[in-house]
Amino acid sequence: MTTKLLFVDDDLDLLASLKRLLPRHWQTVTADSPKLALELLESQGPFAVIVSDMQMPGMNGIELLHRSKELSPDTVRILLTGHADLHTAIAAVNTGDVFRFLTKPCESAVLISTLHSALGQYQLVVAERELLEETLMGIVRVLSQILGLVNPAAQGRANRMRRFCKHIASVLRLPKPWQYEMAAILSQLGCLTIPPAVMASVLSGRPLSATEQQMVEQHPTTAAKLLLRIPRMEHIAGMVAEQNSARNDGSPPRELAASNAELLGAQILRLSGALDLLLTTGLAPGLALERLRRLGDIHPPELVAALSEFDFGIDNMVSLRVHARELNTNMVLEEDLFTVDGQLLATRGERLTEPLLAGIDNYSRSVGLREPVAVLVSLLDYEVPKG
């Protein structure tokens, strides 16, 4: 866990003395202006602790620490202040923007003791967050596996959308990227109520009846209602609920991530879902992205641009025809996978996962598959047939 500390003060002599004072095993970074501090938070974070002077040109310490909270919520914030600023400093502590405040001049022992406390607080916050995220991801994995057993095609769509969402969040360096990936994994949970045959029609682009269309339109709401029963999943539920209706509101993605992450998540889901449908109906990636670019009133251009860097290629892959018992997690489907009675289990381009393979095995033994199955295997995993 990081022990990086960021000190912000326009007094260069003070910053130099701090570097000499603090233990060498602490990674100490200094900034002589709030502007530089914000840049460092983005480019060199995460920082465990930020310590800021109160009175600085251009931006005071309270404003800086408030903005640092938006950029790095886990970072513990400490304010250095003169006696004249005490009332302001106390107000900052009471609003939750500041962990501690110290008066200047500050004794070395007091400063180091406070920093030890701040590092302990940072470790506690991060540990609690990681535990929560791991618990939620465990719940998400179980729900995803249940979906895969009941409706493999829907789970496959969710997995493909997850890859798109993860890529967008990474390229745009969005805070809390895990929430967008989690929303994608759960985006098709409402498809538990959709018959597999209807799901197959959706993914193949075949026309739907009015009743079938209503089923499809309601699945985000169904999923959101289920997710709202799980503590701390409110934001994820909001993203999932609006995945088919969110539109471009003109806000830059990183700003929207801070002000309305639910809307941004829904925008990313809508784009990922639209791209997946275009690809599964056979459109080439370049043409699919160009079509989405033309829908700027729906899909934010920055999100579409991020997907232009996505690796859609299947270079260095070998095409094989195998029996169901030979399928494994090193394989990608080259063609849609159907049961003998025509039920779609998984779509072209989908990577086989353990839960999906378990579902395929059940269908293979109970109903039967159309075999052989067309798959792609990386050259690294390809074994030349013997004989």
Image: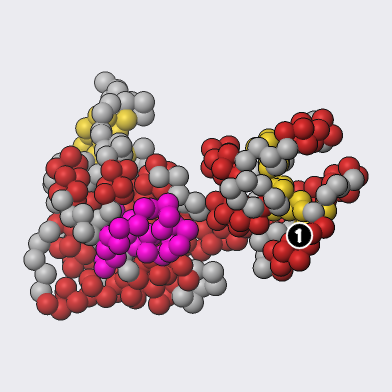
Residue at the spot 30% in from the left edge and 33% down from the top edge: 377
Foreground pick, 313 / 309? 309
Is-magenta flag for residue 16?
no
**Image quarter (top left, top right, bottom left or bottom right) of the N terminus:** top right
- Say if residue 4 shows up in the picture: no
Is residue 112 toward the left or the right of residue 97 in the image?
right
Residue at 17 percent across and 62 percent down: it is 202
Closest to the observer: 99 or 182? 99
Residue 197, picture quadrant: bottom left
Measured from the top left, where is residue 78 in percent x and y? 73, 53
* Frontmost residue, 97 versus 221: 97
Tell me the residue that label 1 is attached to: 85
Of the pair 212 and 108, the residue shown nearer to us: 108
Neighbour tally class for label 1: few under 14, some 14-19, many 20 plus, Cα within 10 Å: few
The residue that appears at 31% across and 49% down in the rendered structure is 303
Count of residue discs: 1
Name the chief secondary structure element in magenta: helix
Does the magenta segment cover residue 257?
yes
Residue 236: image location, x then y, percent: 44, 65
Tell me where the magenta segment starts and ends, as one range: 244-273
User: Relative to 105, is 187 above or below?
Assistant: below
The answer, for residue 83, to whether it is visible in the render is: yes
Q: Position of residue 305 (x, y in %)?
A: 28, 43
Q: Position of residue 174 (x, y in %)?
A: 45, 49
Going by the numbered disc 1, the residue's amino acid type is: Asp
The image quadrant of residue 195 is bottom left
> Label 1's element?
helix
